[in-house]
Image: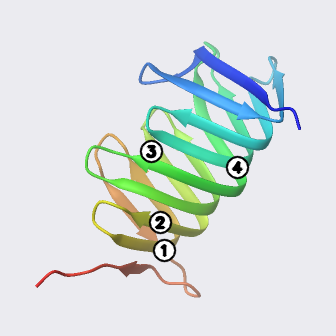
Amino acid sequence: MIKLFIFIAMSISLYGEQVEIESDSFEANENSKVSYFRGHVHIKKGSDQIDADLIKITFDENNKPTKYEATGNINFTIITNSQNFSGSSNKIIYSPKDKTYKALGDVRINERLKNQILRGDSISINRQSGQTSIRGNSKRPVKFVFTVDE
């Protein structure tokens, strides 16, 4: 299988960081300002990484990304100043404007620095503020597992 390696530095940058995307195929529509990366997609921005079946990137009128949306077999690593998350979910959306990742559907995260396990229906991670919020639902409440040193 031939991997399509897309190296996008000028039109796709977050905080001036370089973004690298590998996928089996790439499709762009200039009129709708949307790009699709399909098949074994790996996206890397700084220390953050996402693996998925599909990543859709939406651009504004100045060709700057406004939303990254990943679906299918998602695994991710998100590293902030004080947290190191690795996990999986059904979907993950990144908003460059507010620097927030939102993982949706059967979210499972391991916070490696604090040895915590987080589970919920949706987890939001704001890279700028460092705030993390977790939501559950009536069938699956939020679950937080951690070790206490006493």
> If you read the primary sequence from the N terminus, does the residue marked by circle 4 or circle 2 appear first?
4
Check disc 3 and report the residue beneath it: 100
Q: In this view, does 128 lie to the left or right of 53?
A: left
Comes first in the chain, label 4 or label 1: 4
Q: How far apart are marks 4 and 1 (CA)?
A: 19 Å
Looking at this view, name the residue that lies furthest to the right. 1
Specify whether 111 is left or right of 23: left
Res 81 quadrant in image: top left
Question: SS at mark 3?
Answer: strand
**What type is the residue that disc 3 sits on?**
Thr
The residue under label 2 is: 109
Side (left or right) of 104 relative to 113: right
- Please name the residue that numbered disc 4 is placed on: 52
The amino acid marked with disc number 4 is Ala
The residue to which callout 1 is attached is 119
Question: Looking at the image, is mark 4 or mark 1 nearer the viewer?
Answer: 4
Quadrant, the N terminus: top right
Q: Mark 4 against mark 3, which lies toward the viewer?
A: 4
Location of residue 9 (image quadrant) = top right
- Outermost residue on the front side: it is 1
Name the kind of residue labelled 2 in the image: Ile
Give the distance between the C-alpha atoms of the residues marked 1 and 3, in whole angstroms. Answer: 18 Å
Callout 4: 10 Å neighbours few (<14), some, many (20+)?
many
Question: What distance separates the C-alpha of mark 2 from that of mark 1?
Answer: 6 Å
Number of dots carrying numbers: 4
**How many residues crowd mark 2 within 10 Å: few (<14), some (14–19), many (20+)?**
many
Residue name at image x 50 percent, y 76 percent: 136
* Mark 2 in CB contact with mark 1 (< 8 angstroms): yes
Q: Tag 3 or tag 2, which sits nearer the N-term? A: 3
> Mark 2 or mark 1, which is nearer to you?
2
Q: Which numbered circle lies on residue 4?
A: none
Q: Looking at this rendering, what residue extends furthest in the bottom direction?
A: 139
